[in-house]
Structures are given as C-alpha cells and as structure tokens.
Amino acid sequence: MSNAPDTSYRHLAAAYAARQLAALPKHLRAVRNGSRGECVHQARVAGRRLRVAIRVFAPCFPAKPARRWRRQLRRLLRTLGEARDRDVQIAQLDDLLAATDDRRLRPGIERLGLRLRQQRDRRQDDLLAAVKRFERSGTMDQMRQSLADLGPARIRRGADVRSRTVFAEGSRQMLAALQTLLGYRDCLWNPRDVARHHAMRIAAKRLRYAMEAFAAAYPSGLKPQIDAARQLQTALGDLHDCDVWMEQLDTFIREEQEHTEEYFGHTRPFARLRPGLDHLVERQRRRRDELFAEAGRTWSRLGDQAVWEKLVQTLDRRLRQAEATEPTAERPDVPDAPPPQATDPRDDARAANKDSP
C-alpha cells in the first residue's frame, strides 16, 4: 500500500472486519454444542471472511498480532473444512439413497455412507478441540480491541468511506485478483486440467472477497460483479467437489477390498458392494462432464455480459473521480506477480468478453 491508511480506509476496515467477527462466536457456540451441517458451514464462512479482512486491510492492524490471528484462524478453518466436507458428502449420499429403487445398488452406497459417518464421528472430537482452542486463544478479544481502536463497528449514516486511499487500494487489490483469475481462463478448454480448475475456483473466491471488502465504497456495492464471481466460484466449486469425490471413491474401493480380504481371507463378500460403487463412479464421471460444460457456459455468459470489463471501468472511473478531487492520489501499482500470459487487466478483461470455451 503506497499511502498510509486514512480515516475512511480505517473506518471501512473496522466496519467490514467487525461484521465478520460478530458472526463467528454464535456459530462456534453451535458447533461446540454438537450441531453439525449448516452451523459448521456458517462458522467456516465467517472465519474465512474474517481472515480475508485481516489480509485485505493489513495496514490497519498491528503486524505481529495480525499474523498470529491469521495463523489461529487457519488452524480452525482447516478442521471446520474437513468436517464440512464430510457433512456435505453424507447428505448427498442420503439424498441418493432416498431416490434409489434398485436394491442391488444400496449395499455399496450404504457402506460408503457408513464409512463417511465413521470418519465424521472420529473428526468430531478434533473439531470440538479446535473450537475450544481457538476460543481460548484470545484471538477474538484481541481483534475486538484492535477494531475498537480502529473505528466504529458500523458505517454510520452520512459517513464517507470514499477516499483516494480507499479507491487506490481497492483498485489495486481487485485488479490484481482479476488478473490472476483471467490468467486461468484457458483451462476451461481442457477438461483434464484439474489442478488449474481448482486454482481458478480459488482465484474467483479471492476476487469475490476483495470486492465484498471494498463494496461499501461504491454506489452499486459492486453487486453485479460480486454475483458474477459467486456464480463462477459455485460452478468451479461443484466441479472441484466432483473431482474430490472421484478420487475418494477410488481410494475407498481399494481400501474396502483390502479390509474385506483381511477379515474374510478373500474378497468374495465385496461383490455385493460392487454394483452400488460402480454406479457411483459412473455417476460422478457423467456429472463431471456436465459440470465442466456448465463452468464453460458460465464463463461464456459472464463474458457476453462484459462483467469483468465493466468492473475495470467502474474501478477506473471511481479512482479518477477521487484523483480529480484529491489530485495527489497515486495510481494503483501493477500487480507484483501477474500470470505469464497476462498483461494489463483492462486488456485481459476485454479479451475475456470475446473468449468462450
């Protein structure tokens, strides 16, 4: 960040981070009381956004404590994520079983569901310990004190969080995130480029979070662009979940065969599980093809709507207006590490509107 945080920037940071911090304790209490499913998801979302707030508004926080807060949140989020992944998979299998009439398929699906529930139950103690450890770390109390020193927890009516510093830093971070995202767009031509599909999902998520952090400074709240990033993140997230399922199914089939042989001395009892497991594998392969096509359609639709070009135009226009009012403002720096094929995000955004897989 080229300029020191001004009052508008500090107030924007305080309001955004305080909102995320306020949401976290109630969700953690629900998790600690044994709730699963949605409360685990909401705790994970609140923790992730809080961690993003510390990174996005880093100049507003004391450096050493901020590193410790992010480290504590990362540990918590890792455990929440593992539990959440199992909850989602169990729910999907339950839905599939409810819709399955073929009795030959049920044993394999039920066995996988049993193993997932066993894994989830084993993780519950780790999850409760992680929540308790985080609550006792003092991270939330320390952040509350830091935010109280930083500014009001809500942007008051009539308060102005628009300044040259806000627009310069917002533009820098959002353009850098957009440039990273655009650098992955060619992976949507290749269904086997699994690693870059996952990386593109993360890039879409980071762009969305950056936009959400600075949204209050823009008249539209960047709502169309945030919605677009959410759509892309969802499409790529579904694709990634399918990839994880396929990998885990292969592992499960191999390990279940080994367990059967160890217990019975042969693998014949595994035969009753095979139809359901083969059905799951084939179902995931078909779904993977459908989800890859849907991700490409989503990208093309956003390109047709010129979403990214309009984002660049909005950022540029608001920054120029701020510079006209406060002429000493500096233009945002070019991102430090652009993807090799990227040049200027403005050019890439225009090109993205013409590209479609």
Image (cartoon, rainbow, N blue to C red):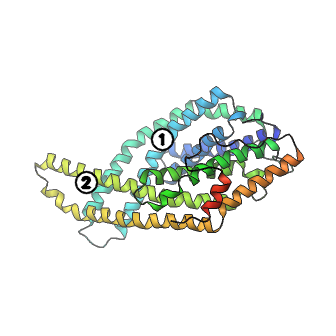
Q: Is residue 39 above or below residue 309?
A: above
Q: Nearer the viewer, residue 116 or 218?
A: 218
Q: Is residue 145 above or below residue 21?
A: above
Quadrant where the image shows the N terminus: top right
**x%, y% of residue 73?**
55, 37
Q: Secondary structure at mark 1?
A: helix
Q: Residues within 10 Å of mark 1 (few under 14, many from 20)?
A: some
Q: Residues within 10 Å of mark 2 (few under 14, many from 20)?
A: some
**x%, y% of residue 189?**
47, 62
Going by the image, does 324 lie left or right of 222? right
Going by the image, does 248 lie left or right of 343? left
Going by the image, does 178 lie left or right of 39? right
Q: Secondary structure at mark 2?
A: helix
**Labels 1 and 2: the sequence-earlier one:** 1
**x%, y% of residue 99?**
36, 71
Can residue 221 be seen from the camera position used here? Answer: no
Can residue 216 be seen from the camera position used here? Answer: yes
Residue placed farthest to the bottom in the image?
Answer: 101
Q: Nearer the viewer, residue 139 or 59?
A: 59
Three-letter amino acid code of the residue under disc 1: Arg
Q: Nearer the viewer, residue 120 or 182?
A: 182
Mark drawn on residue 224: none
Q: CA distance from mark 1 to mark 2?
A: 26 Å
**Which residue is label 1 attached to?**
78
**Which residue is label 2 attached to?**
253
Q: Could you tell me which residue is drawn at 33 percent across and 56 percent down?
A: 113
Three-letter amino acid code of the residue under disc 2: Ile
